[in-house]
Amino acid sequence: MQDQAKPEVQNDQVEQAPATPEVEEPVVVAVDSDFEEKLLQTEAKLAELQDAYLRAKADGENIRRRAQDDISKAHKFAVESFAESMIPVKDSLEMALKIENVTVESLKEGTEVTLRQLVNAFEKNRLLEINPVRGEKLDPAKHQAVSMVPADQDANTVVEVLQKGYTIADRLLRPALVTVAQAK
C-alpha cells in the first residue's frame, strides 16, 4: 500500500474560526396595564368562541346522527301502516272460509264487506285507483294503450278499460291498461 501524503499545513495558513457575532441585548418594552387587560379580554373571548364552536359542532353531529336513525327507521317500517290496515281484510277472508253453510247471498255480502275494508285500507295509505271512463283522453302518464280499435269517438280516447291502474302518494304504481280509438 502506498502511504498517502498529507499536505502539510504551515502555521500561518491555519484557518481561524470566524469571530462570534456580538449578541445584542434584548429590548425591553414597557407593557401598559391597559394592553394586558385587552389581551386577557381577547383570550377570554377566544375561549368563549371556541367553546361555542365545539358545542355547535357537537349539536350538528347529533342532529345528523338522529336524522340517519330516523331515515333508517322509516325505511325499516315503511309498510307498517299498510300492513296494519290489511290485517282486518285477511281476518275477514279467514272468517269467510270458516263458515260451513255458505249461501250465495252470504258469500256475496261477505265479499262486499271485505272489498270495502280493502278499499278503505287503500285510501288510508294513499293507494288510489286509476279507472278512466269511456271517451277520456289517453294520458300516457297514467294509461297504457294495449291496442287501437275502430270506434265512433275521437282518436286516442279510451274505448275500454282492461285493467285498472293505481297510484301511491301521487306516484304511478301501475298504469291502467286500455284500448283506444283509432284515428278515422
Image (cartoon, rainbow, N blue to C red):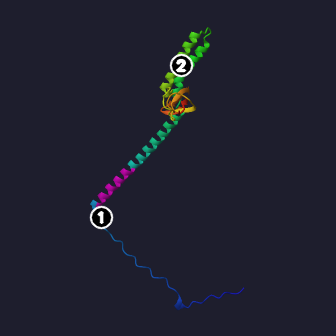
> Which kind of residue does numbered mark 2 sit on?
Leu
Q: Secondary structure at mark 1?
A: loop
Bounds of the magenta span?
35-50
Between disc 1 and disc 2, whose residue precedes? Answer: 1
> Which kind of residue does numbered mark 1 sit on?
Val
| x then y, percent, for residue 46 | 36, 54
Relative height, residue 70 to residue 121 (above, below): below
Query: In front here: 79 or 137?
Result: 137
Q: Between tags 1 and 2, which lies in front?
A: 2
Q: Secondary structure at mark 2?
A: helix
What predominant SS class does the magenta segment belong to?
Answer: helix
Residue 162 part of the magenta segment: no
Residue drawn at 53 percent across, 16 percent down: 112
Q: Residues within 10 Å of mark 2 (few under 14, many from 20)?
A: some
Q: Residue under circle 2?
A: 115
Residue drawn at 56 percent across, 10 percent down: 105
Q: Residue under circle 1?
A: 31
Spatial CA span between label 1 and label 2: 90 Å
Residue drawn at 50 percent across, 37 percent down: 71
Query: In front here: 158 or 103?
Result: 158
Relative height, residue 45 to residue 116 (above, below): below
Query: In front here: 31 or 140?
Result: 140
Which of the 4 image quadrants contains residue 89?
Answer: top right
| x then y, percent, for residue 57 | 43, 47
In the orientation shown, which residue stands out farthest toward the front? 184
Query: In front here: 22 or 153?
Result: 153
In the orientation shown, which residue stands out farthest toward the right? 1
